[in-house]
Image (tube, rainbow, N blue to C red):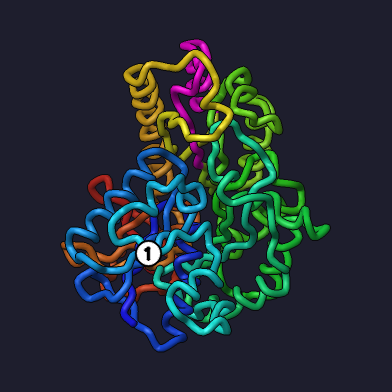
Amino acid sequence: MKAYLRTFGCRANQYDTEAVRAMILASGGEIVDTLELADVAVLNSCAVTADAEADLRRAVRGAAADRPGLPVIVMGCASARDDGRIAALAGVQHVIAGADLPSIAMALDLDPILVGTRPSVQTGSRALLRIQDGCDEHCTFCATTLARGENRSRPEEHLVQEAAVLAAEHPEIVITGIHIGSYGTDHGTTLSALMSRLVRDVPKVRFRLSSLEATEVDDALADLFADDSKRLAPHLHAPLQSGADRVLKRMGRHWYSAASYAAAIERLAGRLPVFALGADVMTGFPGETAADHAETVGLVQSLPFTYLHVFPYSARPGTAAERLSSAVDGRRSRERGAELRAIGETKGAAHRASRAGTAADVVVIGAADMGGRRHGLTEDYLSVTLDDDAMPRRARFDATLVMRERELVAFRR
């Protein structure tokens, strides 16, 4: 069997696709890069925005046009919420909710014994380790909780074993999930306890946390950040969504306020000489006023962000926000987004400039670009050009960063 795999959405989805890839390879199958070579296509869908679902439907229609008769399997969050529209698309043979690996194995006619297979090498330069699935919170705009269900943490021992295998090939492991800050609440443990165990028992590799709520960084996790940036990257992607408490309340994000978010960030940033801070910020949520937007702008300007992901509100079927009044005009939402993105770009440029002449821990990522240059990723999530184009993918080295024509270049120390 030759399978074409495509992932839409977050790193948790990317991890699930890696699990499907591992099952196929273990069965003696082959992963191909194009639909033309495939016997089957597996598309891992996202339900975060209407655009994400539209992208999936376009991909399915494109597969049907390019390869009439090619069987298509759709998995992921959008499939878990399918109202029949995905199943009705030409070529779709199976719509499988979430990452139901036994059902995917059955749809691919694989031996069920392969369901537990995990890859020793993933396709990316950096490996992904999904530590949990689902979410117990109920943000009024979020369809992911409806698609993924409640928090389910993976056993610590399994995670340590998987991380040890991945560390043999990958210099960095990204900890991912749907709500990683809730890890262990169903097992009587915590994310910080897991990370302490991983740092202790899986040497040399650099761990990086994916999206984590700012107020879920407890003292033990803050200590880990501060202890050794070579083991836990000093990088926090802390969803903000809004800097206005009134909007946060309408969003159902009850566990923090603008003030408690800022306090958590300032407490951590004050301990770290090098620190990357990113956030998701939503504009145009129902009822968001000009004053609310101004509060968000003020909070973003006051904190040491190094990048922002800014996106407009997208109504998702079945969510509570769909029933809220006072919709925001799309043009106004886009204008607010443009303002926030400009602030993020200014802050990002200032952070990059501040790193010139300093030391960095660099992981070589991806293939060479069109100019033959290779790139790396620093501990604080900066993409840098490598002075040595011969550096192999997945190498890791200590570097000095030098600014050349507004581009950071990493020189081996």
Extreme-bottom residue of the structure: 28
x 38%, y 46%: residue: 85
Q: Quadrant of residue 42?
A: bottom left
Instruction: Name the residue nearer the viewer: 38 or 338.
Output: 38
x, y percentage for residue 279?
51, 38
**Is residue 264 within the magenta segment?**
no
| Residue 411 seen anywhere in this rendered image of the structure | no
x 55%, y 45%: residue: 144
Q: Quadrant of the N terminus?
A: bottom left
Instruction: Name the residue nearer the viewer: 69 or 212.
Output: 69
- Determine whether, in the image, residue 133 is placed left or right of residue 223: left
Circle 1: element type: strand
x, y percentage for residue 390?
27, 75
x, y percentage for residue 269?
61, 41
x 42%, y 83%: residue: 25
Residue position marked by numbered label 1 in the rendering:
93
Stretch in magenta: 278-302
> How many numbered badges does the structure rendering display?
1
From what the image shows, is residue 59 above or below residue 28? above
Q: Quadrant of the C terminus?
A: bottom left
